[in-house]
Amino acid sequence: MEHKALAAKVHQLYAEDKQASVSSKDHSFRSVDLQKVIQVMPRLPGVKMAVFTRRLVVFHETFALLKSLSNTISIVWHEAISGRTADDIASSFITAMKQESGVKHFTFWVDNCFDQNKNWTLYTAMVSYVNHESGPESITFKYLIAGHTFMSAEKQ
């Protein structure tokens, strides 16, 4: 019963941030989700002559506004550029924040994936970015309860 009560409280806080996002000009409220890994087959000229080609793994991190799906930021990269390490995830957060110049405060709603969203690499990168002269004043992470992670980024 405590788990359900905690999940309800967290969803109430999510709803409050969703409402606050309407009136705030210098605060960005976003939900973030690393989408399912996409495997694509590279397009080859003369494909009938190619006997075998390896699929290319593509990663897609979505930064969706809480209120609507307009102005969703998608960071997409493939395995030839980089992987899915903590460094890569931290880099996607910084890249997304750079897309919203002038925003002073960021609040990110994320799931409880330890490897992606709860690690020292990500936290250290965020502290470094806040302390950078062109960085925001604050970055806040809010975590949904495991098993109750429905958020706007998952609609993508």
Image (cartoon, rainbow, N blue to C red):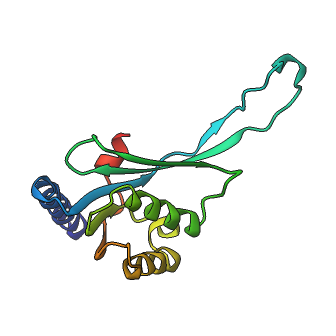
- Near-viewer residue (121 or 46): 46
Residue located 29% across and 72% down the image: 140
Where residue 110 appears, as percent x and y from the top left, is: 36, 61
Residue drawn at the location 40% of the way across and 60% of the way down: 98
Q: Is residue 150 above or below residue 109?
A: above
Residue 126, x across and y down, in percent? 42, 75
**Left or right for 46, reference 81:** right
Question: Quick check: can you spot residue 6?
Answer: yes
Front residue of 6 and 54: 54
In the rendered image, the quadrant that contains the C terminus is top left
Residue 123 shown left or right of residue 69 in the figure? right
* Picture residue at 39% right of the left edge, 82% below the top: 131
Q: How many marks?
A: 0
What percent of the width, then of the height, locates residue 46?
A: 84, 18
Q: Is residue 148 visible?
A: no
Indicate the position of residue 60 as horizontal and vertical percent values.
Answer: 51, 47
Compared to residue 31, the image places residue 155 above or below, namely above
Residue 45 found in image quarter: top right
Vertical order, 138 against 41 (above or below): below
Q: Quadrant of the N terminus?
A: bottom left
- Specify whether 117 is left or right of 85: left
Q: Quadrant of residue 7?
A: bottom left
At horizontal 82% and vertical 34% (from top left) the residue drawn is 53
